[in-house]
Image (tube, coloured by chain):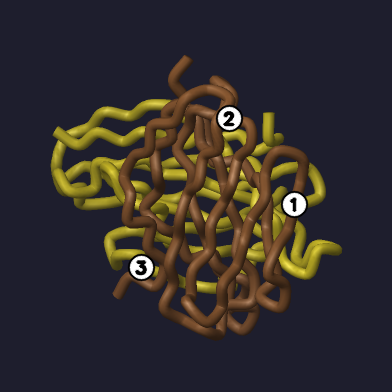
Chain colours: A yellow, B brown
Amino acid sequence: DSGVTQTPKHLITATGQRVTLRCSPRSGDLSVYWYQQSLDQGLQFLIQYYNGEERAKGNILERFSAQQFPDLHSELNLSSLELGDSALYFCASSVEVGTSGYNEQFFGPGTRLTVL
Amino acid sequence: DQQVKQNSPSLSVQEGRISILNCDYTNSMFDYFLWYKKYPAEGPTFLISISSIKDKNEDGRFTVFLNKSAKHLSLHIVPSQPGDSAVYFCAAILMDSNYQLIWGAGTKLIIKP
């Protein structure tokens, strides 16, 4: 158990709809990352938040948005859903900079989104 | 543009033998390389890392080798065990880009009894 929780585990919805994915980071971690993994692909970085502020943006569509709340949990909002948005969405958390010189990211179990 | 590539989608190895997973990269400025392991229905878990200034790092049965001139790294697992069956991801970090991880597509390792 990584200490990162994600809800829901599975989500099935229709095209055009909007969904919200939730992530609670490990206790003490200030950074939250969102990733998308489509079938047989690597993880695509979407966005990072640090202590409530957006820190870095990756390949995130304009239809997607995220935020990190004062209690450090984060939500990823996906709107106007398309069939191609079906994927696994992972959340990860980390300290800002670990003693190893880089931030080891701890991943949640993911949310599987199916758009029909 | 795929900066980190894992060209073998899958690899099958006999239990007890050596598993070698390969990863190529294009950006010579990467600072760290990491290997993550992923079981079905779980998130990736960190396995081992190597700094770009090293050429080898060992942790128990796992050793990562870095060949900077070839822009290639490999993960060796010796001896391979059934519990090693998983998808292995190679990832790279550019510290200047807020430590973002850039991921390969993964290699599915199957350990045969």
Q: Relative to B105, is A6 above or below? A: above
Res B55 → quadrant: bottom right
Q: Are marks 2 and 1 in contact (CB under 8 Å)?
A: no
Chain of residue at mark 3:
A
Residue bearing mark 3: A59
Q: Nearer the viewer, residue A112 or B100?
A: B100
Q: CA distance from mark 2 to mark 1?
A: 15 Å
On the image, the x and y values in percent for residue B75 come to: 57, 51
Q: Report the amino acid beneath label 1.
A: Glu
Which residue is farthest top? B113
Res A18 → quadrant: top left
Kindly identify the residue that appears in the image at 29 percent across and 75 percent down. B1
Q: Report the amino acid beneath label 3.
A: Asn
Crowd class of label 3 (few under 14; some 14 to 19; many from 20; radius 10 Å) = few
Task: Indicate which disc residue B58 carries.
Answer: 1
Q: CA distance from mark 1 to mark 3?
A: 33 Å
On the image, the x and y values in percent for residue A23 come to: 56, 42
**Taking A51 as reference, is A48 left or right?**
left
Q: If you read the primary sequence from the N terminus, does the residue marked by circle 2 or circle 1 appear first?
A: 1
Q: Nearer the viewer, residue B75 or B27?
A: B75
Disc 3 vs disc 2: which is toward the camera?
2
Task: Indicate which disc residue B80 carries.
Answer: 2
On the image, the x and y values in percent for residue A54 come to: 57, 70
Label 1 secondary element: strand
Task: Indicate which disc residue B46 carries.
Answer: none
Chain of residue at mark 2:
B
Kindly identify the residue that appears in the image at 48 percent across and 14 percent down. B113
Crowd class of label 1 (few under 14; some 14 to 19; many from 20; radius 10 Å) = some
Q: Nearer the viewer, residue A109 or A10?
A: A109
Kindly identify the residue that appears in the image at 85 percent across and 63 percent down. A99
Which residue is farthest right? A99
